Amino acid sequence: MTEALFLADLNHARVGDEFTLGGDEGRHAAAVRRIRLGETILISDGAGHAIRGDVTSVDKVSVTLRVDEVLAADTPTVRYVVAQALAKGDRAELAVEMLTEVGVDRIIPWQAARSIVKWSPEREERQAGRWRATAREATKQSRRLRVPIIAAPMSTRELALFAGQAAVTLILHEGARDPLPQLSLPPEGDVLVIVGPEGGLTDAEITAFEGAGGHQVLVSDAVLRTSTAGVVAVAQAQALQHRVDKAK
């Protein structure tokens, strides 16, 4: 049986400690997930650390486990950052969910020129909160120990400035000539993937990102939805990076 993962502050828990999971996560574990005595669960701080142990007691609002193991995820040398254009409906949140599952480190909401959805200052925190909640749930579902950071929304100008600081910037575009797997990826640093909206990138946006050192790349012989293009690109880049690491 797959071990359930929950998110909480670990309070420097050590092997042999008793740890009680309370709050919303504790209620969810006890009342929704129906965690039982003796069941092994994971609790992560969302920043790369976790504890594993058998549940020793359960009530209506919390579960307690004995800490049998303290875990730590490897610190990545290559960090994947995805600038996700705002999209209508649940497209953007679906993208956040899948990007979390493949292990991206940071997701940037991007107000592209052709994004139908606009985040007004009044709606910005609420919408970003939905992205953060989606990322947390996807982290638990995929049993990852790190929750990706949902950054503050960026304009095209701000994103171009950020791209200039990345180790490499990949601009997903159906008109590109170079397939992503033909590129050379850096051994460390930020790999920025820019995903446009359903209406595509404008010439001005491409010019801005290329001016910051970005490269147009293909990830498919078809035009992908904004909700799937990013995860396909990251998966290809990860596979490419894995081959490079094995060749060292």
Image (spheres, rainbow, N blue to C red):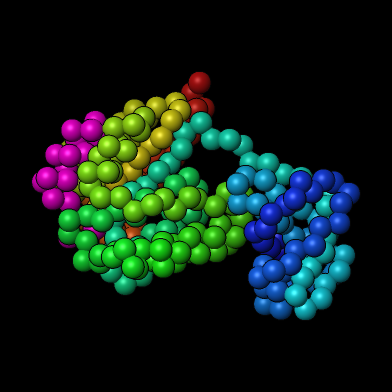
Kindly give the residue lying farthest to the top in the view shown.
248
Q: Residue at x 19, y 35 (%)?
A: 210
Up/down of 47 relative to 87, above or below: above
Inspect the magenta stretch and tell me whether residue 123 lies in it. Answer: no
Up/down of 210 relative to 49, above or below: above
Return the x and y of residue 40 as percentages of the image width and height. 78, 60
Q: Is residue 52 left or right of residue 227?
A: right
Q: Quadrant of residue 118?
A: bottom left
Return the x and y of residue 76 as percentages of the image width and height. 54, 35
Q: Nearer the viewer, residue 97 or 178?
A: 97
Q: Quadrant of residue 120?
A: bottom left
Q: Quadrant of residue 115?
A: bottom left
Q: Nearer the viewer, residue 151 or 120?
A: 120
Return the x and y of residue 107 as percentages of the image width and height. 41, 50
Q: Is residue 43 left or right of residue 67?
A: left
Q: Residue at x 41, y 50 (%)?
A: 151
Q: Which residues are magenta?
A: 197-216
Q: Is residue 19 left or right of residue 9?
A: right
Question: In the rendered view of the protein, which quadrant contains the N terminus?
Answer: bottom right
Counting labels gives 0
Up/down of 34 relative to 174, above or below: below
Return the x and y of residue 149 as percentages of the image width and height. 48, 50
Kindly give the residue lying farthest to the left in the view shown.
203
The reply to whether residue 94 is visible in this rendering is no
Q: Residue at x 87, y 65 (%)?
A: 56
The reply to whether residue 43 is visible in this rendering is yes
